[in-house]
Image: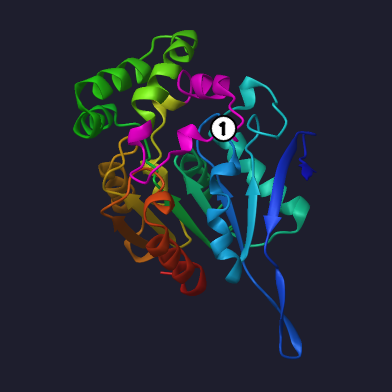
Amino acid sequence: MKVRLVDGTRLWFDIEGMGLVPDGDTMRERPTLIVMHGGPGGDHNGFKPAFSAMTDTCQVLYYDHRGHGRSDRSTPDEWNLDRWADDVVEMCAALGVERPFVLGLSFGGFVAQRLASRHPGFASGYIFLSTAAFKDRTAIYEMFGRLGGSEAEEVARAFWEAPTEAAMAELAVRYVKVCGPLYTQAPGNHFLNRRTIHHNEVLTHFNHHEGPEMNLLPELAGVREPVLVAHGELDPVTPMVGAERIVAALPPDLVRFERFAASGHGVFRDEPERFFEVLRSFVDQGI
């Protein structure tokens, strides 16, 4: 399905689970959980089927960001955090979704942080999952070296410091081969998922325009909704120090911090049972 935004751009979305459920003589409304995928340049499919586990608690709304997956490509001048955050608000207005919980994974977590600061009161709560407020390249290279040795560290450094978009695109194949398997600890890996629709030009554009200057920490002090920060100790591309900085920047009475010792990037992949228990309790009870 697709929903048309104010500027005519169409976002692809999918909904799993019931919003209204029978409860005695009434119909009880359940919350909506919006899951925002990583990248840039990926799509939503990595959440499926794992997030079906949440349909006993809420309705799950999957979508592809503007420029990604099955959504309209739009143009590079609109591949930025403000536009991606505004898209979520417009999508929900068009679909009649009110006060959702918003989960942002990795790059989706960048969008979620901007959404929380740019649109206060929009959501019931946020989940910042395996993300950071800015790209700490030193920590990234050190973690890839710890997990994969000097080759992984060198490949990561070459990829993330590629001087041009074209150079980054050329290095992507080797990065995926050498560094991709280090993202998670579970057998198999989302980089090997052939279902993903890749638009790598969105990745290279973001990482040579807004990405290098991005620092979301100053705006987090103004967040007004509860936030669950969930992060893996073995995450190489958004190392744990990034999550610690996010937690320190948020209002302390609104944040819940959950560390996952055996997880890499995207803790639902490595420790699904505990992650979904934590997520369910947050949606049900808040902090």
Tag 1 residue: 194
Q: Amino acid at mark 1?
A: Arg
Position in image of residue 148 (x %, y %):
24, 30
User: Which element carries disc 1, helix, strand or loop?
Assistant: loop
Residue 25 colored in magenta in the image: no
Vertical order, 281 against 218 (above or below): below
Colouring scheme applied when the structure was drawn:
rainbow
Position of residue 89 measured from the top left corner of the image (x, y, whole percent): 66, 48
- Compared to 11, does 199 lie above or below? above
Q: How many marks?
A: 1
The x, y position of residue 270, in whole percent, is 37, 51
35 on left or right of 94 = left
Decide if residue 237 is in sight here: no
Residue at far front of view? 187
Residue at figure coordinates x 30%, y 36% from the top left: 236
* Quarter that holds the C terminus: bottom left
In this view, the residue farthest toward the bottom is 25
Which residue does the image show at 41% across and 14% down from the upper left? 171
Q: Is residue 225 left or right of residue 65?
A: left
Viewer-proximal residue among 89 and 144: 144
Instruction: Tell me which segment is drawn in magenta.
Output: 181-210
Is residue 70 found left or right of 277 in the rendered image? Answer: right
Q: Main secondary structure of the magenta part?
A: loop
Q: Is residue 98 left or right of residue 131?
A: right
Q: Is residue 261 placed above or below 130 in the rendered structure?
A: below
Residue at 38% in and 64% down: 274
Please say whether residue 189 is one of the residues in the magenta stretch: yes
Residue 273 quadrant: bottom left
Tell me, yes or no, if residue 210 can be seen here: yes
Whole-percent x and y of residue 142? Answer: 21, 30
Residue at left 47%, top 59%? Answer: 224
